Amino acid sequence: MTVAADTMVCRTCGEEKLLDEFVRRSKSPNGRYHECRLCSRAARRVHYAGNREYELARAKTNEAKKTYEARYREEHREERREKNREYYHAALEENRARARVSSAAYRERNREQYRKYRRDRQQRVHREMDDYSLAFVNDVLREQPFCCYCGGFVDKIYIDHIVPYAEGGPTSWINLAPSCNNCNLRKGRKSLLEFLILLTPNERTLSDHPTVPLKEVREIG
C-alpha cells in the first residue's frame, strides 16, 4: 500500500491518517508515534481502568515530590543561584564556542530569512528614533571606543537597548548605550541587572570608567 508523505498508517486501527492526528515523538524516524491519538487515548483509558489504585498512588507521590522540590528551591534559592553562577563562569568559553557554532549554522541554513529579519528590524528601529536620539547615536555613541558593560576598547561599537527592545524598551537616547559585539550578544533579552550579575568581577567596570555615557544617562534618568 502506498502512503502519502503527509500521512501515516496507525498500527493499532490500521487506518491511514494525517500526521497531525499522531502524537509527536522525536526519536521516531518521521517524528511521530506509531499510534494515532484516538487509539493512544483509548489505550490509556483501558490501562487506567485496570490500574486505578496504582495510578492514584503514583499521582499522590508525584504531587508530594513537586511540593518538596518547590520548597527546596525556595529554601535554597541563594545557594542554587551561586552554583548556577559558578557553573556559568566555569563553562563560559565552552558555551560561547558552542553558541557561536550553533548561531553560524542557523544563519547559514536560513541565510535569506536572517537577512530579511535583520533588515526589517533595523528599519523598524530607525523609524522609531526621534531626531535627538538619532543625533545622540551618530555624534556620541559612535565616537565612544569603549564598551559600557565590560569597559573593553573596541574598533566597532554596537548600539544596545538597556531595556531590551524585545521587551518593549524604547529606541530613545535615554535607553541606548554603546557596547561591544560580545556584550551585545550576551545581554540579548536580559535586563540590565540580570546581565550585570553574570559578568565576572574584572568585567564589572560600568561605574568605574569615567568616559562611559551610560553612567551619565543613569544619572540624568
Image: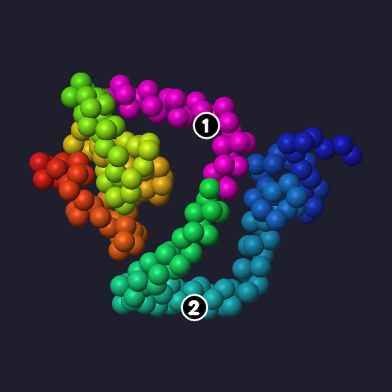
Q: Where is residue 7 in the image (x, y as percent from the top left)?
A: 75, 39
Q: How crowded is mark 2: few (under 14 residues within 10 Å), some or many (20 or more)?
A: few
Q: In this view, does 220 lie to the left or right of 38?
A: left
Disc 1 secondary structure class = helix
Residue most toward the left? Answer: 220
Q: How crowded is mark 1: few (under 14 residues within 10 Å), some or many (20 or more)?
A: some
Q: Is residue 60 magenta?
A: no
Which three-letter amino acid code belongs to the residue tagged 2?
A: Thr
Q: What stretch is highlighted in magenta?
A: 101-128
Q: In this view, does 117 lie to the left or right of 35?
A: left
* Magenta-colored segment: predominant secondary structure: helix
Q: Does the magenta stretch include residue 117?
A: yes
Q: In this view, does 205 lie to the left or right of 34?
A: left
Colour mode? Answer: rainbow
Q: Is residue 161 above or below residue 192?
A: above
- Kindly tell me whether residue 164 is visible in this rendering: no
Q: Which residue is drawn at 77% across and 36% down?
A: 5
Q: Position of residue 170 (x, y in %)?
A: 25, 34
Q: In this view, does 13 lie above or below 116?
A: below
In which quadrant will I find the N terminus? Answer: top right
Q: Mark 2 points at which residue?
A: 61
Q: Disc 1 and disc 2: Cα gap in Å? A: 47 Å
Give me the disc on residue 93.
Answer: none
Q: Name the residue under label 1.
A: 114
Q: Position of residue 159 (x, y in %)?
A: 32, 36
Which three-letter amino acid code belongs to the residue tagged 1?
A: Tyr
Q: Which residue is drawn at 38% across and 36% down?
A: 156
Q: Where is residue 211 in the image (x, y as percent from the top left)?
A: 19, 44
